[in-house]
Image: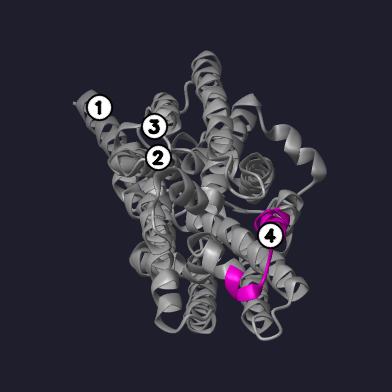
Amino acid sequence: MNYKKVQDTINLQVESQSDYNTEIQQSTDSLLSVDNTPKNSFIQQYKNYFLIAASLIMIGGYYNCLFQGFIKNQFLESMNFTNNQYSTIVTVPHFPNIIVPILIGPLVDIIGIRRGTFICCFVMFLGFFFIVISIIPKSFALILIGKILHQVGTENTHLCQSTIVSKWFKSSNLALALAICSFMIKLSSSLSGIGYPYLYEKNNSLLLPLMVGFGFVVLSLLATVLIIIMDKKSEQYDCPCLIEENIVIISKKHQFQLKDIKQFDGLFWLICLQIFMIWGSFYSFQNYGQSVLINKFQFEQTEASSSLSILFFVGMSSPLFGFISDKYGNRAQVMIILSVMCVFSFLLVLVAPSRNEDMKPIVYIFLVLFGTAISIGNAYIFPSIPLIVDPNYLGTAFGISYAAKNAGTFTYSLIGGFALGENDQHFNHLLFFLFSTLICLVIVSIITYMYDKKKRDILSLPKIFTNKKIKNISTQQLI
């Protein structure tokens, strides 16, 4: 009889301990997101509103940063510039962005993402203000300074946008969130391809289109202030500590050091090389594409400008590819596919007969294919960075990747302008240069796939999870 009572008591204690462990497990799950970081109730509730505001901070930058490419001939005529001066305007502003993002990334890690975002957005605003006032004296020096400031501000605001969006969406749907931001960028650039030629034709002046562009820059600055307020508010809901066996452990923020760059492995640098090639070729063609369409395929000026906007309209499919990326993964394989698409698209326009209006359908097929490839790249390449990089080094990683993007833009635009020639007649030289480098992109993409398979096979994951867990915390320890 006494033995039965003892056994019942033991069973009751075991059941109680089991219930206690279950409660602890449920409590832990409610506090942690899928990547084992503490949940923030404010972020969970308002992240969709935050994403809308974060998407708007780039509209002023990308509506205006390529405006000269859409109205190249009109721009040169209005400002009395030469082709050499135009080449300087489209290449020199990208040179500082080879270095600045590398410095901005660590700086953002140190001073905070909010201060960094506001500073970069204000530089973007200031630069475009100089561009607007430069049309009065038709000053080459003033517009060049404005383009440099605006380009530096735009690219580094984009870097900060990627970092702060990664912070809000690191637990789920990061690729989709970044793809939506990319969608707004493509939408802005598409509207620019329509708006600038149309508004210029209205009064045969740069003043009206530039004033509309300035309005978008002001909108971006207001959106930046809004996301700063929201992000600061979210900190009031942060979990200030981690719990291990009833002991409070205060979390410490990592401070950037130069040696942190050693944390990036070969896979990260291969992705940066892909970024260098694909965006270098894209922006180089964007800067000189109007001349190619006019001189090789007999497009009218306005028709050529509007046709280039197809690249950005097609690019608005990025959210769809972002959803597919989150759901199915296979990023390295898709990078190979987009590289082949780029090569095939340029092969079409390269071998097409020159000065033949019947070839215009080939041009539209090229623009759709190339634009789709860029859209896929936005959804698959940049969102791969948080997957392979420790969150503590995310700002630095995005800084290096954006530096690679701008190094590609500067290099390809410089070589592209030289290949095209002073009179824009060597269009096949430009197309052959871009075609050749995109073949190299295919090779690099294959190497990236093989490296990932051999080392970690992390790019095939269907969702973005960080492998790093919060120090000193796990479900087993809590139980």
Q: CA distance from mark 1 to mark 3?
A: 88 Å
Q: CA distance from mark 3 to mark 4?
A: 47 Å
Q: Nearer the viewer, mark 1 or mark 2?
A: 2
The residue positioned farthest toward the right in the image shown: 258
Packing grade of label 2 (10 A; few <14, some 14-19, many >=20) is many
Disc 3 to disc 4: CB gap under 8 Å: no
Q: Nearer the viewer, mark 1 or mark 3?
A: 3
Between 294 and 290, which is closer to the camera in this rendering? 294
**Which range of residues does the magenta coloring cover?**
77-94
- Residue type (three-letter) at the residue carrying disc 4: Val
Disc 4 to disc 1: CB gap under 8 Å: no
Which label belongs to residue 370? 2
Q: Secondary structure at mark 4?
A: helix
Q: Is residue 27 visible?
A: no
- Residue with the mark numbered 4: 108
Which label belongs to residue 7? 1
Packing grade of label 4 (10 A; few <14, some 14-19, many >=20) is many
| Percent position of residue 263, x then y | 70, 33
Image quadrant assignment for residue 265: top right
Query: Relative to 308, is 425 on the left or the right?
Result: right
Q: If you read the primary sequence from the N terminus, does the residue marked by circle 1 or circle 2 appear first?
A: 1
- Residue type (three-letter) at the residue carrying disc 2: Phe
